[in-house]
Image (cartoon, rainbow, N blue to C red):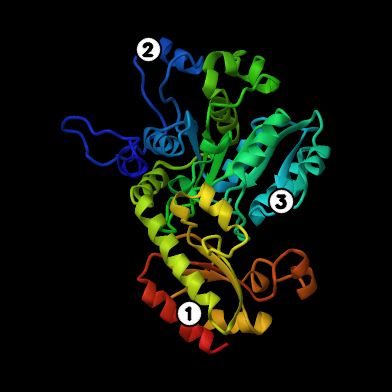
Amino acid sequence: MKKETICVQAGYESTNGGPRVLPIYQSTTYSYESSEELAKLFDLSKDGHMYSRISNPTVEAVEKKVAALEGGVGAMMTSSGQAASLISVINITASGENFLCFSNLYGGTTNLFAVTLKKLGIEARFITYDMTDAQIEELIDDKTRLMFAETIANPSLEILDIEHYSSLAHKNGIPLIVDNTFATPVLCRPFEFGADIVVHSTSKYMDGHAEVVGGMIVDSGSFDWKDYPCLTSPDESYHGVIYTEQFGRSAYITKARTQLMRDLGSTPSPFSAFLLNNGLETLHLRMERHSRNALEVAKHLKKHEKVAWVNYPGLEDDRHHALAMKYLDNGYASGVVSFGTVNGKKGATVFMDSLKLAKICVHVADLRTCVLHPASTTHRQLTDEQLEKAGIKPEFIRFSTGIENIEDIIADIDQALEKV
Ligand SMILES: *Cc1c(COP(=O)(O)O)cnc(C)c1O
């Protein structure tokens, strides 16, 4: 099936006389007729559900849909994007080990990696696109377990050269994990370019309606885990199962579920999965419209006298345009545009407060146009000088273009810019 058909059809198949739409299995547990059958589930020698902390039929249908969209061997839904990032890393790292990650990651991920994982004894080593391969390799030692990056970085909108960094990771025997939240598999499938694991905050475009927080981990099944004892030696917490032997290409995602989801319990509710599935059914239509609208917005801003600068990888003269053309289907660069007004922070504040259709929200990437001014919200404790250092200019506005009529969006921008 093509991606548009997968969005609509994959994951759930209705049976003769059965419900046409994915049912919500609101049940914590599953009944069996013999203890032996249940014992087989505990031994992982038979497929099936036993307890909804670990798996649930509604959640499973959505996991199958996302796995199909990304072209992976399996997926696991989590209660949030943060939980997906956390589990994707600690599934193959332990105290005393380290990993590489780019410094342009989503702020929440950066906190998780730099502060919380540090407390657990796992060290995040930050790298940038400016560094040479040799400089990056200097940070790799025999305790380095993975490299973590974002396809389209939130909010800098830099595009990852997936082929380049996946080869660099593989050359050093480690997998590349890619946060594909802003692109979604409709615009980019990182596995096709060598990435090994994909994570998502499904709270953004995948849900698309700003209704439900969720996350997803997808396994490509292509990384060779031979140097990862956590996958190749017996798991004592699971009757000595050896994940690579018993589950082959699905070793990573099986361990994430049977060990970490079991122990951490970052479980999505069946209702959340149902809502996410509704969102996924129209993802292909929305991503196209978001991208077309955002390009119009970026072009319009670019020629406006009240606008100082515009960042959007879909623009031909954007520094990341070539990478956008290579990695994003049709060069569609998703819905987020960042720009600065004239008049610094004051100009940005006047612009934000004058918008009518676009609302000020912390959220990003849903079907309603919304904006955020990092300098006065998420980064408000910083001085202008500190903001500059963090790469956030005082006038920086993150504009999340919705799927409304483009003329209405631009009219709203124009009336607000007039007041700047
Ligand atoms: C929002 C976001 C996250 C965190 O996801 P939550 O669902 O809010 O926990 C992770 N990565 C990116 C790129 C995001 O935009």
State whether residue 107 is above or below residue 399: above
Amino acid type shown at disc 1 = Ile
Q: Is the distance from the Cβ of mark 1 to the nearest ligand 1 atom less than 8 Å? A: no
Which percent across, then down, holds residue 280?
Answer: 38, 47
| Mark 3 surroundings within 10 Å by alpha-carbon count, few (fewer than 14), some (14 through 19), many (20 or more) | some
Which of discs 3 and 2 lies nearer the camera? The answer is: 3
Q: Is the distance from the Cβ of mark 3 to the nearest ligand 1 atom less than 8 Å? A: no
Mark-to-mark CA distance, 1 and 2:
64 Å
**Residue located beneath label 3 in the image:** 129
Which percent across, then down, holds residue 97?
Answer: 78, 33
> Is tag 1's residue or tag 3's residue first in the polypeptide sequence?
3
**Residue located beneath label 2 in the image:** 34
Mark-to-mark CA distance, 3 and 2:
57 Å
State whether residue 260 is above or below residue 111: above
- Quarter of the image containing the N terminus? top left
Residue at left offset 42%, top offset 61%: 290
SS class of the residue under badge 2? loop
Amino acid type shown at disc 3 = Tyr
Q: Residue furthest top?
A: 36
